Amino acid sequence: MGELQLPVAGEVPAAPPTPPGAPGQEMLTALRERLALVPWRKVLEQLMPAIALGLGILSQTYAKHTVAFAPKAVALLVVAWALAAGIGEWLPEVKPDERHARLRNFLRKAAATVTVGMFRNVLFFLVPIWFGSSTLGSFNMLAPILLAGVALFACFPTKFRQTMLERPHIRTLYCSSVLFVALVPAAAVEIGASPRLSAALAAGVAWLASSLATSRQPLTTRVGRIELGGGTLVAALLCALAAPILPPVPVSCSEAAIGTGVHNRDIEGAGERFPAGTKRIYAWFAVHVPTRYRQGIRFEWYRDGERVGNVSAREIIGGREHGYRTSSFTPAPKAGSWRVDLLTDASQLIARKTFVVE
């Protein structure tokens, strides 16, 4: 028989042993403890650039905006600029002893997030349009590369807000630059302006907007208005002169080929190397421009870096689903390395093809 154990006076009875839990419950408890130690705010801040980049790409992939969206992009940009300028005025920094400080901080962050998102969406719309009008390996690739860098920087919301939006002068320079980039395709869509004229108009409007955003004092005096108008004209003129180094937005080339013939407006005998004695070699391009848009173009042929033959000029008309297909040929080309440039009438490079005659 077992012995009967009586508790000793003043002694606390020992707690019964805890029954072993199920293995799944123990793992769940351990996981909860580990998750509680994770600095989620810091992790979210680190992941935010990748999330913003993914959302920007997805939005453009599914929205499938064409260049016709450009005027709406300008409107979004103006609203974003106004929000960026108004946050400091409408929602100033919270004072230490102020009531409803948490609410104001929340509203400031929410407004800043919306503003950054609008800028990012406009940039992600503009980048493919400018890249589509540029030519790989040419100098006009520089502008879309810079634009892509700015769009990527917008994926870092905190840094972007602190660097671009919370500094008035930098914000004005940044917003006017993006406004210029958005107005170029918008002017072509709305009024059918050529790439050079679109760039000139966009530069003038962007200069005027940035000047008035910095100070409205020039509007109060006659001299100030003259200086403001003169600056606008100078900006437009400089941009018109610099048009050859810019992509011919919104003109873009979707297809290009070199061949020995053209039948039903399609290239035949396409290739990159041709034997000596070939009777004719054709350069063929499919060019996309907006509806109701007319653009003067010209072909320039080069052999071993030197221009040969006569310049072939013509006009293309927009609105065709598969692009406006145009071509030019050179008869009995000599042996050497050849290049064909398709340019606008303002010398902006649309597309380029190379081939070799052996």
Image: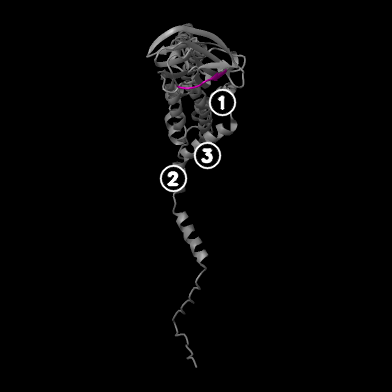
- Give the secondary structure at mark 1: helix
How far apart, in angstroms, are the residues tagged by discs 1 and 2? 31 Å
Q: Residue 43 sits in which quadrant?
A: top left
Q: Does the magenta-highlighted stretch encompass residue 269?
A: yes
Would you name the residue on which mark 3 appears?
106
For this rendering, which residue is in front, 31 or 272?
A: 272
Q: Amino acid at mark 3?
A: Phe
Which region is colored magenta?
Answer: 266-272
Would you name the residue on which mark 1 appears?
76
Camera-side mark, 1 or 3:
1
Q: Residue 140 sits in which quadrant?
A: top left
Q: Is residue 250 visible?
A: no
**Picture coordinates of residue 156, whole percent (x, y):** 45, 35
**Picture coordinates of residue 57, whole percent (x, y):** 52, 34
How far apart, in angstroms, are the residues tagged by discs 1 and 3? 23 Å
How far apart, in angstroms, are the residues tagged by discs 2 and 3? 18 Å
Ranked by sequence position, the earlier of labels 2 and 3 is 2
Residue at x 46%, y 32% (from the top left corner): 154
- Give the secondary structure at mark 2: helix
Taking the image as shown, residue 315 lies to the left or right of residue 46, namely right
